[in-house]
């Protein structure tokens, strides 16, 4: 008879910290997560500005504005900024997301003031020199081309373009011609119109008190007074009442990247927590249904997962795997069947309990460093989630019932039909997906070439 | 900040390292076995990595996939990895699940159970992993080829993931023989870091691991590398790549040697940050490449100092290759500047401070130092080895290593491209 695994005593919990805040007169909100055990401070500046704020005419401008802010200010050249950041080991990053922008630094506490001096210069006084923009544009043109050799990129791009056709959320990738047509004036105006202190959040995390954070914020960001972004007007989401089958031809592929995309819930939807649990049951990890079926039972793939993307007005479930080309059909059919089963059957108590624990466990691990807590807090505020969102997260996860998981899965599948995407060698896989419906065929460059 | 850990050895040979840090109710459990792809025999390439997969296929008291399922149900995260020199298994769990994590590792160290069906299933999984990670990815096959070309010794030259033909022919008996030989407690290092009380944790470790008899008498592989006497160069046509790329490598001494630290500091000067020499010349000033990386790996045996860059469209590989080499030769001829060395030191100081913020990183560092350099206290002292490197050390190491007969290069040229 087998020995049983040891049983744990009690339940571990962590308290989400109280986060002091101060609003500066210019509208900049200053937050601090103090943790003085390590001599490091991270500073994250979040803006409620994202890819959706790009105009339809050019989807590259904000990306260029965010990336190129460090390429010269009124008092420093790009070369000087790089020299100074590297010399003081300032770890700087900037990211443009769908609905937000983040500039972040991490630095040894003893170099914090130097780092803030540079960061504020970059954010408040960028000049976007023409010659720097030329270099960035040329480099990015190559990078955008190289992205198109990646099957995961091609599948995800097709998912957004299909599920959010005509909606700002379709603005997930940059067309090469937009990049080539971007002008310095366009970049400068995009930056000036969007990145001001009102609505922005300056979050300090690590070896710093809130008093000092506020003092630093006043000193380096107190004079900041430029325009902030206007809210985006969102049209209604496109109709997805029929299933679509899409193939991206990638000749000489030795695998097929399959991806089933379903439009899902907005980040603030009350059912979102149940959907997270449902996603965990279906494809959230190596104990979930997709992994067990496609890898552990069938040996079709190295890994099969589903993930959630959630935005203010809608979201996506992306379920997929890289599979052996000759079992593309079986893999897609299995994947679709697993999706359907989420809506028709109840998860077992074991699946539900495990999935809840996985979500709560991941949350506890995120509470390990002040920087990752800061990331959570910024996301909460920029998404418009309630104050007690993280304090109540463990109990809300525990409250999700099997019936609720089925109900939310059913709601997702009833409201929208899936986009079924296969990226691979058309000659090998087209006849493995055409039983699902008419196959729309695209090149890797995004040009539609079928049905002929 | 000093990391105060304790070290213990069980009578069966298991080396145990404990580190207490009660700030968050998490514990990291890491088990490193001193076996990797360099321990494989010819014809059995890929076995160490395949065996890493097989360790999740069940043991006497744990069913297939139950290992991960129980850790997931505890709210933990877990994984494993195989390198040329070692295989590690790790989990981070809420600290009240420490017993579970230990019990699971001990059960499979003592009594792995693999059925022919499960063996076959994981063989297929690994074949698909190879396709996903290498065969279906731009530059993937060239990456596999690079070590094969550079190393004369098969031990480090063959791919960790394995050759296709070997993967198809590996047998369950070979896997079980591998387990018997390499997976005993005497060949392992166990690190438990996080929210523990040392005495209690040690007592639980003894409870689970002490009954396991040692069965290992592994033979260390011969990693000696013949001195390369002429440049090696190949051109690879890649149907999946869009942009050309260059891979360049030079033989150099192993991890832990003074040349390793000197060349690690040089790699920071060459490619760390937008102000680094190669980034500035190759990316920023001239727009020849989209990205450039350099540095040693972290091998027990002979290392390679590698440089990788992806070319921007239209740039000729030969010219870029020469420009890369010129920068390396310069490092062999001229001392790096004081401010470059100070910058590298500042970055080392930051990196050592930053990795102490998570118990998983502390735990993995302790295990790595024990396995690679037999001294876990290097977590506190290795930084001094980096900071002690002088400009003379760097120039002298570069002069020894960056010579024409010591270099290996692969040029990857796109074939077909994206349509």
Image (cartoon, coloured by chain):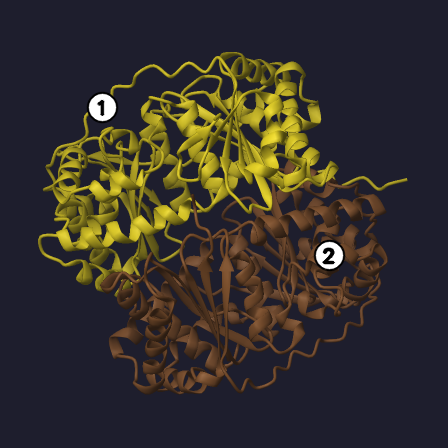
Chain colours: A yellow, B brown
Residue at horizontal 35 percent and vertical 82 percent from the top: B329
Question: x, y percentage for residue A257?
Answer: 56, 38
Of residues A120 and A408, the one drawn nearer to the viewer in this rendering: A408
The residue at which mark 2 appears reads as B167
Disc 2 crowd, CA 10 A, few/some/many (<14, 14-19, 20+): many
- Looking at the image, residue A324 sits to the left or right of residue A309; the answer is right
Question: Does residue A98 appear in the picture of this structure?
Answer: yes
The reply to whether dot 2 and dot 1 touch (C-beta < 8 Å) is no
Q: In which quarter of the image is residue B264?
A: bottom left
Please report, as a chain letter, where disc 1 is located: A
Q: What element carries label 1?
A: loop
Nearer the observer, disc 2 or disc 1?
A: 2
The residue at which mark 1 appears reads as A231
Of residues A41 and B5, the one drawn nearer to the viewer in this rendering: A41
Mark 2 vs mark 1: tell me if same chain: no
Please report, as a chain letter, where disc 2 is located: B
Question: x, y percentage for residue A116?
Answer: 21, 52
The dot on residue A95 is: none
Residue at horizontal 74 percent and vertical 36 percent from the top: A297
Of residues A169 and B407, the one drawn nearer to the viewer in this rendering: B407
Question: Does residue B58 appear in the picture of this structure?
Answer: no
């Amino acid at each position: 008879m087998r020995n049983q695994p040891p049983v744990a005593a009690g339940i571990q919990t962590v308290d989400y910290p109280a986060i002091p805040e101060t609003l500066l007169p210019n509208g900049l909100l200053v937050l601090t997560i103090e943790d003085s055990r390590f001599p490091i401070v991270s500073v994250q500046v979040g803006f409620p500005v994202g890819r959706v704020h790009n105009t339809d005419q050019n989807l590259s401008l904000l990306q260029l504005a965010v990336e190129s802010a460090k390429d010269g200010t009124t008092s420093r050249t790009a070369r000087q900024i790089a020299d100074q950041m590297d010399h003081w080991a300032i770890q700087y990053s900037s990211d443009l997301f769908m609905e937000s922008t983040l500039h972040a630094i991490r630095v040894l506490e003893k170099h914090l003031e130097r780092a803030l001096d540079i960061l504020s210069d970059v954010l408040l006084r960028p000049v976007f020199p023409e010659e720097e923009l030329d270099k960035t544009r040329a480099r990015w043109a190559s990078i955008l081309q190289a992205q198109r050799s990646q099957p995961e990129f091609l599948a995800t791009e097709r998912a957004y373009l299909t599920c959010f056709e005509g909606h700002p959320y379709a603005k997930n990738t940059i067309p090469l011609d937009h990049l080539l047509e971007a002008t310095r004036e366009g970049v400068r105006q995009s930056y000036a119109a969007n990145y001001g202190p009102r609505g922005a959040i300056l979050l300090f995390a690590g070896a710093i008190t809130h008093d000092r954070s506020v003092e630093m914020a006043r000193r380096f960001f107190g004079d900041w007074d430029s325009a902030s972004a206007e809210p985006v007007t969102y049209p209604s989401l496109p109709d997805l009442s029929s299933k679509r089958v899409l193939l991206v031809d990638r000749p000489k592929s030795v695998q097929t990247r399959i991806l089933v995309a379903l439009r899902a819930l907005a980040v603030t939807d009350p059912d979102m927590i149940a959907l997270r649990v449902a996603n965990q049951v279906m494809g959230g990890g190596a104990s979930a249904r997709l992994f067990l079926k496609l890898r552990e039972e069938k040996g079709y793939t190295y890994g099969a997962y589903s993930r959630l993307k959630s935005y203010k007005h809608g979201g996506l479930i992306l379920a997929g795997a890289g599979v052996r080309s000759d079992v593309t059909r079986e893999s897609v059919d299995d994947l679709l069947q697993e999706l359907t089963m989420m809506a028709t059957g109840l998860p077992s108590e074991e699946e539900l309990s495990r999935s809840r624990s996985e979500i709560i466990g991941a949350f506890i691990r995120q509470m390990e460093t002040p920087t990752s807590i800061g990331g959570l807090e910024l996301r909460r505020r920029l998404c418009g989630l309630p104050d007690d969102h993280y304090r109540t997260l463990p109990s809300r996860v525990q409250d999700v019932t099997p019936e609720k998981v089925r109900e939310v899965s059913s709601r997702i599948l009833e409201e929208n039909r899936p986009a079924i995407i296969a990226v691979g060698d058309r000659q090998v896989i087209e006849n493995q997906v055409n039983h699902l419906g008419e196959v729309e065929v695209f090149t890797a460059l995004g040009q539609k070439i079928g049905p002929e | 900040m000093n990391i105060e850990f304790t070290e213990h050895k069980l009578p069966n040979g298991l080396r145990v390292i404990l580190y207490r840090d009660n700030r968050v109710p998490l514990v990291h459990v890491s088990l490193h076995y001193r076996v990797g792809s360099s321990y494989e025999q010819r014809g059995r390439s890929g076995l160490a990595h395949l065996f890493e997969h097989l360790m999740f296929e069940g043991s006497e008291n744990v069913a297939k996939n139950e290992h991960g399922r129980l850790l997931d149900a505890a709210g933990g995260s877990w994984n494993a990895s195989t390198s040329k020199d070692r295989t590690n298994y790790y989990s981070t769990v809420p600290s009240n699940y420490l017993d579970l994590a230990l019990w699971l590792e001990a059960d499979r160290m003592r009594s792995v159970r693999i059925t022919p069906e499960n063996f076959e299933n994981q063989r297929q999984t690994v074949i698909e992993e190879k396709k996903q990670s290498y065969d279906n990815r731009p530059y993937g096959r060239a990456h596999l080829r690079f070590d094969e070309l550079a190393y004369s010794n098969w031990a480090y030259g063959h791919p960790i993931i394995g050759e296709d033909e070997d993967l198809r022919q590996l047998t369950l008996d070979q896997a079980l023989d591998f387990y018997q030989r390499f997976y005993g407690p005497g060949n392992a290092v166990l690190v438990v870091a996080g929210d523990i009380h040392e005495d209690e944790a040690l007592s639980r470790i003894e409870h689970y691991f002490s009954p396991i008899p040692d069965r290992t008498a592994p033979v260390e592989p011969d990693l000696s590398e013949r001195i390369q006497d002429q440049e090696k160069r190949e051109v690879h046509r890649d149907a999946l790549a869009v942009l050309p790329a260059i891979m360049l490598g030079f033989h150099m001494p192993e991890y832990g040697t003074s040349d390793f630290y000197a060349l690690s500091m040089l790699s920071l000067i060459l490619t760390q940050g937008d102000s680094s020499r190669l980034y500035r010349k190759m990316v920023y000033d001239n727009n020849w490449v989209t990205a450039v990386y350099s540095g040693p790996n972290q091998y027990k045996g002979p290392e390679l100092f590698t440089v990788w860059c992806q070319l921007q469209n239209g740039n000729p590989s030969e010219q870029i290759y020469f420009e890369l080499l010129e920068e390396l030769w310069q490092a062999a001829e001229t001392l790096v500047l004081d401010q470059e060395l100070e910058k590298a030191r500042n970055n080392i100081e930051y990196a050592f401070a930053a990795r102490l913020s998570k118990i998983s990183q502390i735990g993995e560092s302790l295990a790595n130092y024990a396995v690679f350099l037999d001294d876990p206290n290097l977590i506190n002292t290795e930084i001094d080895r980096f900071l002690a490197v002088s400009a003379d050390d760097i120039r002298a190491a570069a002069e020894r290593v960056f010579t024409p007969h010591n270099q290996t290069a692969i040029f990857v040229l796109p074939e077909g491209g994206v349509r």
